[in-house]
Amino acid sequence: MPNKTPDIIASFAKGLRVIEAFDAAHPRLSVAEAAARTGLDRATARRCLLTLVAGGYATHDGKYFTLMPRVLRLGMSALATLPLAQLVQPWLDQLSERVGQSASVAIRDDTEIVYLARAAQRRVMSIGLMPGSRLPAHCTSLGRVLLAALPEAEARALIERSDLAPRTPLSLTDPEAIMARVAAARADGYAIIDQEVELGLRSIAVPLINARGHTLAALNLGMAATQERAETLAGTYLPEMRRVQAGLKRVLA
């Protein structure tokens, strides 16, 4: 049944659904594919796609539509207005310079993490990470710290409906094994990932907690596996990460 609420612009909502239909697995879509992924009829999907083309947000080769870089303005503008992203950036910059590694802050969005801010010393992943980038929560240090902040039943439910397809030969794919790592992160106050997201990459993360004890986000450092052994990460980097964690706790709302 159509939404009859006078304050809701249904066509705008449909356009947003079409934008969200594009992802890494579907970088280009035909009208039929866009309609199938959004649940819209083909005529509506076509009008939305052509509107994106007219606005410079997409391109069309006659059959397939592809989003253009201009669409990034939508997400980047939203991220830039988040006080948390603005607040943590100078802390990340200082931490990254002190330890010589890339630092990031992310929040959880359902089964994924979304990067809010980043200070990169060097590129250690084959994919370029930036604010707005997404990765699975279950196999990232940031994600496991954020899952650890949830009640156990809620964390388990999220993991069980996540795509647990292995990203590397070292990726954990058994929900019980992943839950054990989440439990360890809850007990230890940090999480370490050893080449589960990408071969050659290790990372360590801690939660960012406000003065009320609520986990708002997570902070991590990522480094090449050739630089540090997994068992040395906590001893090497946790003291500096704890300094940032404590400093942000005093100012986070």
Image (cartoon, grey):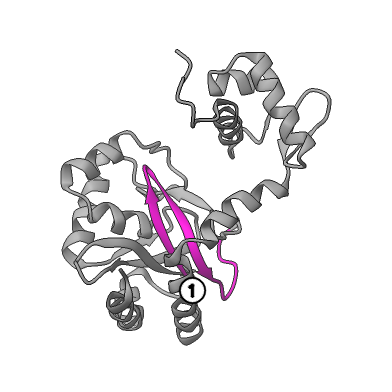
Looking at the image, is 201 positioned above or below residue 15? below
Q: Quadrant of the N terminus?
A: top left
- Give the farthest residue toward the right: 62
Kind of residue at disc 1: Gln
* SS for dot 1: helix
43 or 193: nearer the viewer:
43
Looking at the image, is 234 positioned above or below residue 36? below
Magenta stretch: give its range: 102-125
Label the magenta part by its dominant secondary structure: strand
Residue 221 position within the rendered picture, expressed as x and y whole percent measured from the top left = 43, 71
Residue 42 position within the rendered picture, expressed as x and y whole percent measured from the top left = 65, 14
41 or 141: nearer the viewer:
41
Which residue has dot 1 on it? 89
Residue drawn at point x = 36 percent, y = 67 percent: 204
Residue 30 appears in the figure: no
| Relative horizontal placement of residue 185, taking residue 237 as reference (left or right) | left
Asked if residue 1 is among those painted magenta in the image, a careful observer would answer: no
Residue 116 appears in the figure: yes
Residue drawn at point x = 49 percent, y = 32 percent: 7
Q: Quadrant of residue 25?
A: top right
Q: Residues within 10 Å of mark 1 (few under 14, many from 20)?
A: some
